[in-house]
Image: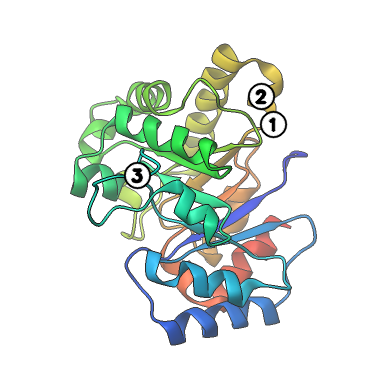
Amino acid sequence: MSARTPLIAGNWKMNGSRKMTTSLIGGIKAGSVPSGVEMLVCPPFPYVALAVEACAGGSVKVGAQTCHANASGAHTGDIAAEMIADLGATYVIVGHSERRADHGEGDAEVRAQAEAAYRAGLTAIVCVGETEAERDAGKTIDVVSGQLAGSVPEGATAANTVIAYEPVWAIGTGRTPTEDDVQEVHAAMRADLESRFGADVAGGMRLLYGGSMKPSNAEGLLALADVDGGLIGGASLKAEDFLAIAQAAG
């Protein structure tokens, strides 16, 4: 692991309740969070404010799962990045493959959402990843490189941007690429970022792996040279599992 601070981020997706939010965060706060590891929970929108309240006085941070590109306006059902910041959250996930697939969000929209995050003072977690068909066709690096180029704004820095590589075929399936495959993609992403933003930005920007990371495989994945944490789905819904992944990053 490099000098980059590991980030263990939990994406709760469309799961939760008021009771679960307070209970899960309470369990995380009661556990042992390694020093030098940053932990983040991203609950559904209705529970973001409650999560911020529950995390008060501890080191766990709160984010949201997406945002609209605009600061306000006639966008029924959408949430502005400024609203997320107003609740006290500090991160927002943009471009998750489930948003890309379910809501037709392409690279240009993801880039606009990341720019909105910057505008509101949030850190954007920009997600990229290939489908199983693209991997089988040998297009993984090309697809990820293209999404990275299209989705990451010109204003990206190591402070306002985190990149999450999530192979679509591995999310929630229990399958993961080999450690060599993960490192190859992460190294390619860092090289792309260096050619675009320079060595200082690329060297400081955190690259997370997502896609069925769990306690049993976290140690090996988090030990890879260009993996700086994880974007965790199912395992983030159990305090014991989430804390075990954080321990593996410490």
Identify the residue position indicated by label 3 in the image.
Answer: 68
Residue at (72, 71) in percent of width and height: 58
* In contact (CB < 8 Å): disc 2 and disc 1: yes
CA gap, disc 1 and disc 3 = 27 Å
Q: Nearer the viewer, residue 114 or 164?
A: 114
Residue at (46, 32) in percent of width and height: 115
Identify the residue position indicated by label 1 in the image.
Answer: 204
Residue at (53, 82) in percent of width and height: 22
- How packed mark 2 is, by other alpha carbons closer than 10 Å (few <14, some 14-19, many 20 or more), is some
SS of the residue under disc 3: loop
Residue 25 locus on image (x, y percent) = 57, 77
Q: Amino acid at mark 1?
A: Gly
Residue 89 horizontal side relative to residue 13, left or right: right
- Where is residue 109, by image quadrant? top left
Q: Amino acid at mark 2?
A: Val
Q: Total number of numbered labels?
A: 3
